[in-house]
Image (spheres, rainbow, N blue to C red):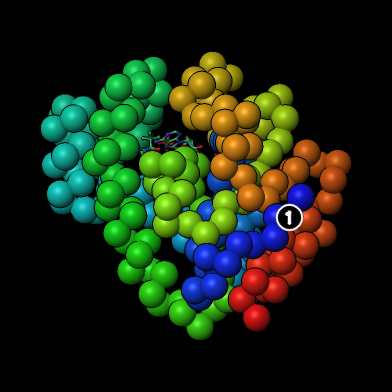
């Protein structure tokens, strides 16, 4: 389970990534860390905000995806964009390259607002591009069986077909690849209790900074 933190991680706040595939339960896990008093930066939410409000990001998205990316009132056509990028890895890569650098610089500014905290969390569906292992001291990976994840998303987002969910999964790194970047693994299979796993990680991280 928990690794012992190496010497390098003595700056505060530590920057901890929480990642996992669609439906693994990243947001649920992060809500629990928030209840422990830990600030959470939600990269996916921030990315969503940028796609709706940042004029440079919007112009770049239109350059990559064409005018259909926004409707006549200027709202992001999320469903249409999802149908394009989750079936075309190259297009997804281009979309990522528009959004992720902005999220990265925004995260750096956000971290500076929390220097009084022992650690902060960055939650992101994709870690390499968005969170980037280099800027994170440790990565927590949330794992859950694929069938359970699909079932959860079908309940949470009833508008998504099973095929769309499977397409998204196929555009994310595999569980095996994710396991390689994990310093901590949280099993969210609705059999093992979440809170004791998170308390153990929290205490381990506190030990590293005190
Ligand atoms: C593709 C878009 C239009 C889909 O929007 P939609 O409202 O349908 O879905 P939502 O944003 O909730 O994402 C659905 C699921 O897809 C996964 N996902 C989202 N973006 C990505 C991505 N770039 N790569 C892989 N999976 C992704 C997440 O697990 C997420 O839960 C939207 O996610 C988007 O613009 N993504 C690019 C921004 C981004 O890269 N965000 C990720 C971290 S910064
Ligand atoms: N342990 C659990 N018990 C019951 N329901 C759960 C559990 N974990 C997650 N869920 C539910 O499963 C759904 C997906 O969880 P959550 O939104 O946290 O996943 P996520 O990894 O953040 O997904 P995404 O990548 O789509 O943002 C939510 O509706 C959530 O309430």
The answer to whether residue 47 shows anywhere in this view is yes
Residue sitting at x 46%, y 77%: 114
Residue 202, percent from left and from top:
70, 66
User: Which residue in the structure is indicated by mark 1?
Assistant: 2
Q: Is residue 89 left or right of residue 139?
A: left
The answer to whether residue 81 shows anywhere in this view is no
* Vertical comparison of 32 with 154: above or below: below
Classify residue 206 by image quadrant.
bottom right
* Vertical comparison of 60 with 118: above or below: above
Residue sitting at x 82%, y 59%: 196
Q: Is residue 66 left or right of residue 46?
A: left
Residue 55, percent from left and from top:
16, 51
Q: Secondary structure at mark 1?
A: loop
Q: Is residue 14 left or right of residue 149?
A: left
Residue sitting at x 38%, y 28%: 82
Q: Which residue is at the far front?
A: 7
Residue nearer the viewer, 72 or 23? 23
| Label 1 within 8 A of ligand 2 by Cβ | no
Residue sitting at x 33%, y 69%: 109
């Amino acid at each position: 389970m928990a690794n012992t933190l190496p010497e390098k991680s003595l700056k505060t706040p530590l920057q901890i990534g929480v990642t996992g595939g669609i439906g693994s339960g990243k947001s649920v896990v992060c809500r629990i860390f928030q209840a422990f008093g830990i600030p959470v930066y939600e990269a996916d939410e921030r990315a969503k905000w940028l796609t709706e409000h940042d004029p440079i990001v919007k112009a770049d998205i239109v350059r990559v995806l064409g005018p259909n990316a926004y409707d006549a009132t200027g709202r992001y056509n999320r469903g249409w964009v999802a149908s394009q990028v989750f079936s075309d890895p190259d297009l997804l890569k281009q979309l990522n390259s528009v959004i992720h650098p902005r999220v990265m610089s925004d995260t750096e500014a956000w971290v500076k607002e929390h220097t009084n905290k022992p650690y902060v969390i960055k939650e992101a569906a994709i870690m390499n591009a968005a969170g980037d292992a280099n800027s994170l001291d440790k990565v927590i990976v949330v794992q859950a069986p694929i069938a359970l994840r699909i079932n959860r998303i079908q309940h949470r987002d009833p508008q998504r077909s099973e095929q769309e969910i499977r397409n998204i999964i196929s555009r994310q790194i595999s569980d095996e690849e994710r396991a390689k970047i994990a310093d901590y693994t949280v099993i969210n299979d609705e059999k093992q209790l979440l809170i004791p796993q998170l308390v153990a990680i929290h205490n381990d991280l506190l030990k590293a900074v005190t």
